[in-house]
Amino acid sequence: MSNPFATPPIPADEVDRDLLDDGIARGNIPALLMVLYQMTGDDRWLADPYAPGRSPGLDDNDSGQLPVPRQHEIREAARDAITAWLDGQPLAVPRPSNARLAEMLTVAMTEHVPQEYGDIIASGMDYGAEEPAQAIVPEGKTAIVIGGGVSGICAGIELGRLGIPYTLFEKNEDFGGTWFENRYPGCGVDTPSLTYTFSCRPNDWSMYFPLRDEIEGYLLDTAKHFELYKNARFNTYVEEARWNEGTGKWGVTVTTADGKRETHSADYLFSAVGILNIPKYPNIPGLEEFAGDVYHTSRWPDDAQVAGKRVAVVGNGASGMQVAPAIADEVQSLTIFARSKQWAAPFPQFRKTIPAGVRYLMQVVPLYRAWLEQRLSWTFNDRVHGTLFRDPEFEHPERAVNEINDGHRRAFTRYVKEQLEDRPELIEHVLPDYPPFAKRMLLDNGWYRTIKRDNVTLIPEHLAKVEGHTLHSSSGKTVEADVIILATGFQTTNVLGSYGIYGRDGENLHDKWGEDDAAAYLGTLVPGFPNFFILLGPNVGSGHGGSMIRNIENQMHFAGEVVLSANKHGARTVEVRDKVYEDYLRRIDEAHEKLVWTHPGTENWYRNSKGRVIAITPWRNDAFWRMTRSPDESDLAFDGEAQTSQRSATG
């Protein structure tokens, strides 16, 4: 069992001490305190007068809210401890217990972190992880991966570790998925860079919240590092996947770049197409005959021109809030059709670069980087989860789901009013009348500043009709435009909608699910579809925040364990049992009924036409992590054990 922080990654005589000192001088005080404790073993660094205070805002609390002299004392002590460690002094506390890790994060976050959360902290810091055993997979077993985005990259990495030969089919010309396709101005991630990172591939990010080009570069570099290109076939579109009971393999039919149709077969099939895959185009009369240019944010052409033009943006979700501020300076006029209202939180680190010294500190002292990541993971992943439950006794359900949620509403409302103080007439058009977090919480990328500009007009209605260059709102307002930008998102409830998939007895998965009612055990397995694994499937995305990469990694780890279980049993096929599948769906629905996303009167892209939440998970991240550590083999049917008769009896 190795300790990832035992020895410095850079020899002491090669360390740039001046740059390191600059990093310590600028570093995050709560994270430095955790490093100090582990390096010295001195408990005083976790208690008053050194314990940090709570930040009044949503920033990283780099000062710990401590007096400047106290901060200076901590930084000096951290420099001495780090110097000693670089010179060979071992960590005094090399491996805190999981319970102790939760206690430490409680101090670092200045709020209670549940003791059981220590398990996922330990995992995130690579503590207690045994070296992976050599996987025993029978020779000749193969896999096919559909999609080359984050999920496909995760699949390729894990299959490589398992020693399973695979072919990856990707419709685009390179890896990246969402980040390959979305190239609109301002495109970036609303998750901190340290958490939007593969656990096996740390990165030296330049920004706290990176933009699209840096993310895509990281994904391509990761694919190269793990030699995924040798298994990938690009510009290849998957038409359908069909289970062959006779051969016990999946047949996958593709159309190649030159238009040829081919069918490939493999024992295992991994769907890595995600849910942000198929653009949603609004049904607006006259849109197809628009006299100007129409760009969907996920299909942004390289030769797109907006400078000096009259531009209209349809939609004010995540992509709309990113693209509008990014182009407002260069367009002649900008009209935003914002039918719905969105909560947007303050974003103090918008487009801020990470200081060179701090980046160097993270490279020289991985323990510091690990604690910084754990703080960010709690803040952006699970911090608010406990505040999103619907309190039936709360007396103002029209505005919030509980008292704490109402406090969030008041804080965000104050922020909106402060931002629009000089344009109070805009407040009624943007201030939501539903509870915070009932829709995905957005970050203020300069949105409120943008809608106040002289060349920007906000129309709080939908675009109802297009005639030539004239755009008509639902109330009859008109505006002239040369360019329409559709920031209308994706068909998130049309899971796996880009290809057909047929399981046992030719059962069509889309018929099983219905038009928009996708479901899967742990978002991964569906009965009747043996040896088939869905990544970023139903109820896997995170509505309360966090990096989707972690949940995808959890799924792929689970899928690998399922494959190993089948091989241990000498089974040709494995799938989830019907009863287990149905029970999990019941648990998912019951859990969501208690949460903010099913609040009456609220619309969001998480729910299908029946109002059922299918896109996001109700679970806290550490709960899903536990569920995916290893399969309960009694939940699985090997070689179709009684599955067909069970379905006949229940169908």
Image (cartoon, rainbow, N blue to C red):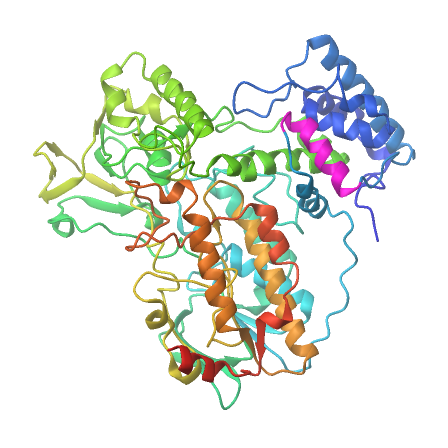
Identify which residue, 56 or 486, lies in the foreground: 56
x then y, percent, for residue 242: 42, 80
x then y, percent, for residue 621: 57, 46
Would residue 159 be visible to someone looking at this image? Answer: no
Q: Main secondary structure of the magenta part?
A: helix
Residue at 69% over, 9% down? 68
Stretch in magenta: 97-111
| Residue 557 included in the magenta stretch of the image | no
Identify which residue, 645 or 380, lies in the foreground: 645
Image quadrant where residue 511 sits: bottom left
Q: Is residue 80 above or below residue 514?
A: above
Judge from the rendering whether residue 399 lies leftward or rightward of residue 545; answer left or right: left
Judge from the rendering whether residue 566 lies leftward or rightward of residue 246; answer left or right: right
Image quadrant where residue 154 sits: bottom right
Judge from the rendering whether residue 66 lies leftward or rightward of residue 286; answer left or right: right
Would residue 591 be visible to someone looking at this image? Answer: yes
Image quadrant where residue 628 sits: bottom right
x then y, percent, for residue 589: 42, 54
Which residue is the extreme one toward the bottom?
246
Q: Is residue 28 above or below residue 226?
A: above
Question: Number of callouts in the render?
Answer: 0
x then y, percent, for residue 247: 52, 89
